[in-house]
Image: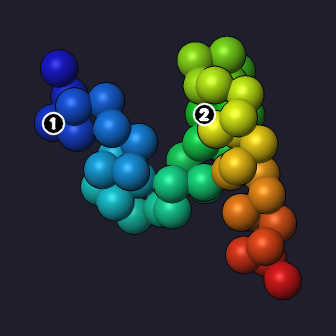
Amino acid sequence: MPASGWNLADTAVTLGVTEPELGLRIEAAGFGDLLRQDVLDHYRARSRRDRR
């Protein structure tokens, strides 16, 4: 088991990115099906807000 225990927030901190960035990277790499749709939608909305 990874040191982050499969926790996206902890993994994002370890990688030095935000949780939405990590989620969108996972999706872009073709693994978006591993995340719930509502989680991806939240990451997309937060990413749009952060870009303003």
| Quadrant assignment, res 13 | bottom left
Which residue was labeled with disc 2? 26
Q: Residue at x 71, y 63 (%)?
A: 46
Q: Residue at x 71, y 35 (%)?
A: 38
**Is label 2 in a helix, a strand or a loop?**
helix
Looking at the image, which residue sits at the far front? 38
The location of residue 27, given as percent across then percent down, is 69, 31
Which residue was labeled with disc 1? 3
Looking at the image, which residue sits at the far bottom? 52
**Is label 1 in a helix, a strand or a loop?**
loop
Question: Where 43 falls versus 46 (above or below)?
Answer: above
Q: Residue at x 31, y 30 (%)?
A: 6
Question: Where 4 falls versus 32 (above or below)?
Answer: below
The location of residue 21, given as percent across then percent down, is 61, 55
Tell me the kind of residue under disc 2: Ile
The location of residue 28, given as percent across then percent down, is 73, 34
Going from N to C along the chain, the mark reached first, 1 or 2, is 1
Tell me the kind of residue under disc 1: Ala
Q: How is the image coloured?
A: rainbow
> 12 left or right of 36?
left
Q: If the image is split into quadrants, where does the C terminus sit?
A: bottom right
